[in-house]
Image: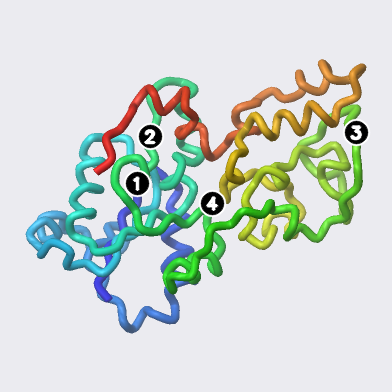
Amino acid sequence: MKIALYNGVSCGGCDLVFFLEALEPWLEDLEVVFWPEMGASDPLALQKSPDRGLDLAVVCGAVRTESQKAFLKLLRTKARRMMAVGACALWGGLPGLSWLAGEGPWPATEVVKFETQVPGCPPEPHTLVAALEGRLAEVSFPLCQECPRERRPFRWRTVRFLAGGPSRECFLAQGILCAGPVTRGGCGAACVKAGRPCLGCYGFLPGRGPESLLDLVASALTPAKAEEVLEALQDPVGLLSPFTLAIHPLVRRRYAPDKD
């Protein structure tokens, strides 16, 4: 199988998970045509190669420059199948927060068409394997369904951002912000099982967004403490939409890309 891997604006973690864990069963059958991080980095050779000669092109990361955008379009002509891997490629990811300070990156999915989109920061290996095998299903249930913690009704008098010690109780019931109720499941609640609240890297559920998480917080507040708790959200965008700011309608209208 001939593959190419292109890493745009990202930390580089997605391609490491992809090659070191998800692709292990297929390594003997792979021919890596292009992957700059591993030395296969001749764009002219790729440009001269036959159209649709690649079996798979994997894109990790967002794109910020016109040359990156043009390279994605080149990959689209050379590959029969394209796979966007990770939150940065799908929605802009953490680099997309730079739109708060000026111009930020575009999600790769806003530049060209991808047959497969794999969420996560980084994706869990089992998610990547399912995508490679063509059995990655659309997830419509919240992460809470995978969470092992004990859930109960709750009201907030204060808000915390880190756990105070080992507990089997729901983070939200402890007054700790967790995006689990509005985030797609599929990761196996990896962060929660490691003792950290969900940040939402598998993306929002259909019809949900950062406003949904804010509504959840507001509904849990006691009226006397509402103003105090909301003021404690010192970085509301980073807390409520750390991975998806670049696809928010108010941001998308600033770059309005033409998808090929």
Q: Are marks 3 and 1 in contact (CB under 8 Å)?
A: no
Tell me which numbered mark, 1 or 4, is placed earlier along the sequence.
1
- The answer for how far apart the CA atoms under marks 4 and 2 are is 16 Å
Under circle 1, the secondary element is loop
- The answer for how far apart the CA atoms under marks 1 and 4 are is 14 Å
Query: Residue 105, labelled with which disc?
Result: 2
Work out which quarter of the rendered image holds the C terminus and state it. Answer: top left
Tell me which numbered mark, 3 or 1, is placed earlier along the sequence.
1
Under circle 4, the secondary element is loop
Residue assigned mark 3: 155
Query: Residue 121, labelled with which disc?
Result: 4
Given this view, does label 3 or label 2 mark the residue nearer the observer? 3
- The answer for how far apart the CA atoms under marks 2 and 1 are is 10 Å
Q: Position of residue 114 (x, y in %)?
A: 34, 53
The residue lying toward the viewer, choosing from 243 and 137, is 137
Tell me which numbered mark, 4 or 2, is placed earlier along the sequence.
2
Amino acid of disc 1? Gly
Residue 221, by quadrant, is top right
Q: Are marks 2 and 1 in contact (CB under 8 Å)?
A: yes
Under circle 3, the secondary element is loop
Circle 4 packing at 10 Å, graded few (<14), some (14-19), many (20+), is many
Relative horizontal placement of residue 188, taking residue 151 as reference (left or right)? left
Residue assigned mark 1: 8
Residue at the far bottom in the pictured view: 28
Q: Are marks 3 and 2 in contact (CB under 8 Å)?
A: no
Q: Are marks 1 and 4 in contact (CB under 8 Å)?
A: no
